[in-house]
Amino acid sequence: MRASGSDPIREAARLLAERRNAVALTGAGISVESGIPSFRGAQGMWAKYDPMEYATLHAFMQSPRKVWEMLTEMVSVCGFASPNAAHKGLAALEGMGVVRAVITQNVDGLHQAAGSRRVIEYHGSMEELICVHCWKRYLTRERWTPGAVPLCDCDEILKPNVVLFGEPIPWLAQEVAEEEARTCGVLMVIGTSAQVSPACDIPRIAKESGAAVVEINPEETSLSGNVTDIHLRGSASEVLRRILEEFSADEETPSSPSHKIK
Ligand SMILES: [Zn+2]
């Protein structure tokens, strides 16, 4: 299904339009343009905080106040970020009935902020806090002030409801994500090389179940030329903008101008 000779963006848009059954798998790359650096990059959190010291469940249980130093920065970075054209593009495609779900490895809540309704958060969300003692959950914005360590009603320290190293992926999120992969017509892999387990299973499951895999990444990844059918090189926002342009070019009378993204 290689797009030889034709414009790969047009080819991808045609597939998406024909099948109307796409699922997106997103990672850090989609949020970079919103000012959230990838954890692993030179500007990332792990360059400053050793994840083994700051981001494991063990570390949190041992010294939650210390881990909250790092988390304070993470909450601030996520809290000030707003969705970019790529997040909005996926939400627009969902509104058009082209994309039916987003599986994300990000914890920034930007897909929901952009208007995506069906979002499967593999690694949880910074929007929520959870008590490791009684499991009560709270909205971060209602319970947390910068610099403070939030407490549960039961007086235990609250943890962001994100998956720390040493914690399993939420069982339900994993089940639902794999079901989406098995039943989608097109899997869009955006801003991730999907190397971290278990997200790495999603492209393979989709491919084996008959889906076309459209990859949107600026660089080659281990998926390119392997499970990827069409690799659209470029930033997530630019590529999604061009895909949406193909859709509006095809529709003689755009039924819903709100699909236009800024
Ligand atoms: Zn509690």
Image (cartoon, rainbow, N blue to C red):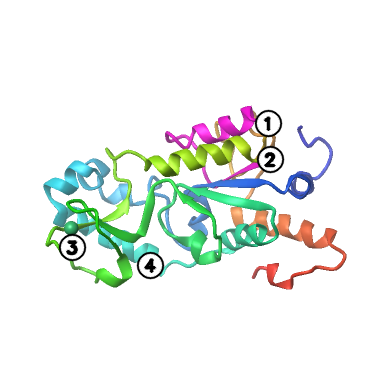
Q: Position of residue 170 (x, y in %)?
A: 37, 43
> Residue at horizontal 64%, vertical 57%?
94
- Nearer the camera: disc 2 or disc 4: 2
Circle 4 residue: 79
Of 116 and 149, the residue lying toward us: 116
Q: Which of marks 2 and 4 is nearer the N terminus?
A: 4
Q: What stretch is highlighted in magenta?
A: 186-209
Circle 2 residue: 185
- Numbered mark located on residue 152 in the image: 3
Circle 1 residue: 210
Q: How far apart are marks 2 and 1 (CA)?
A: 7 Å
Q: Which amino acid does label 1 sit on?
A: Gly
Q: Where is residue 49 in the image (x, y as percent from the top left)?
A: 25, 49
Q: What residue type is labelled 3?
A: Cys
Q: Is residue 52 left or right of residue 194?
A: left
Q: Which amino acid does label 2 sit on?
A: Gly
Q: Distance between the residues labelled 4 and 3?
A: 21 Å
In the image, is the residue at mark 4 within 8 Å of ligand 1 by its beta carbon? no
Is residue 234 part of the magenta span, yes or no?
Answer: no
Is residue 205 part of the magenta span, yes or no?
Answer: yes
Q: How far apart are marks 3 and 1 (CA)?
A: 46 Å
Circles 3, 2 touching at the beta carbon (< 8 Å): no
> Residue at horizontal 72%, vertical 59%?
244
Where disc 4 sits, the SS reads helix
In the image, is the residue at mark 3 within 8 Å of ligand 1 by its beta carbon? yes
